[in-house]
Amino acid sequence: MKKRILSAIVMLIIVVPIVWYGHDLFKIGVGVVSLLALKEILDLPKSHHEYPTFIKLISMICLLLLVLPDYDDSYSIMFGITYRGVALTLLSLLGLSLFYKNDEYKITDAIFLIGAILLLGTSFNTMIFVRMFEATGTHTGLYMFIFLILIFILTDTFAYFGGRLFGKHKLIPHVSPNKTIEGSVIGSLVATIGASIFYHYLINPLTYKVVLGIISLSIIGQIGDLIFSKIKRENDLKDFSNLIPGHGGILDRLDSTIAIMLGYLVIYSIF
């Protein structure tokens, strides 16, 4: 427990100033975190054999092409993600498979990597977009980023305590045996109330559409948690890595956040 608390304090000391300052420092921070997340996926024991070093390098470059936004690019799809970045990812990772033997790097390996890069690239790019969007003279981007993270924190925290106190019915036991329906409902309820108050007083007047959006994002965040739990279960892992003592890896901490960012892409217009 001491190790977990100490790690949390260290993370806050590092992360809070970067998030607060924003600008290029935040972009660099998100880029580094996205690369660490990709490494955890590359290291999954049952997903593949060891990837060639050159393929790992190309994968990292492709990921950064998606994560780091270029809002002035005429080929932009959304939030700075470009057709050019997606095309280079597809062509390079698929094409390079022709130069390796099947036991080194196969088409199925390429498809796995493309999926991982699109997942991480889209979600981490959205983090940058949300934080960097600042109306003149306000902290809209900062507050919106905190708002989305708050949904995750409140949902996760109160789903845990709600499940411990009132949980009787398992949510999806074959994926995460400790999660309960009662905990899930309590987590979403508290997150909706807390995030609604934050949104109303620090971002914009609250509307029923925003409330529905918060509920949706809370549920999506829990789905993300379960998806990454299933990945760990399929690979016989307790944690994705030991990068953060007492907490696991990047994907252990950001599983719900990744899903919430993807959900925000779908429903962002309501905010």
Image (cartoon, rainbow, N blue to C red):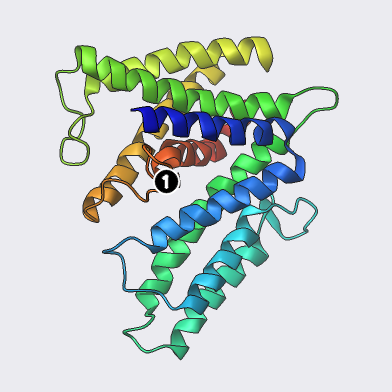
Q: Which image quadrant: the C terminus?
A: top right
Q: Is residue 146 left or right of residue 213?
A: right
Which x, y percent locates residue 168?
A: 14, 18
Residue 246 is at least partly visible in this image: yes
Q: Please report the residue visible at 45 percent of the width from the left and 40 percent of the height from the top.
A: 254
The correct choice, above or below, for 143 with respect to 75 in the image is above
Q: Is residue 114 left or right of residue 102?
A: right
Q: Please report the residue visible at 43 percent of the width from the left and 42 percent of the height from the top.
A: 244
Which x, y percent locates residue 233?
A: 22, 49
The correct choice, above or below, for 195 with respect to 62 in the image is above
Which x, y percent locates residue 166?
A: 20, 12
Q: Which image quadrant: the N terminus?
A: top left
Q: Please report the residue visible at 39 percent of the width from the left and 41 percent of the height from the top.
A: 245
Q: Please report the residue visible at 29 percent of the width from the left and 43 percent of the height from the top.
A: 229
Q: Nearer the viewer, residue 189 or 58?
A: 58
Mark 1 residue crowding within 10 angstroms, few (<14) / some (14–19) / many (20+): many
Q: Is residue 213 left or right of residue 245?
A: right
Identified by mark 1, the residue type is Leu
The correct choice, above or below, for 36 with respect to 158 in the image is below
Q: Nearer the viewer, residue 18 or 145?
A: 18
Residue where numbered disc 1 is placed: 251
Q: Nearer the viewer, residue 4 or 39?
A: 4
Which x, y percent locates residue 7?
A: 46, 34
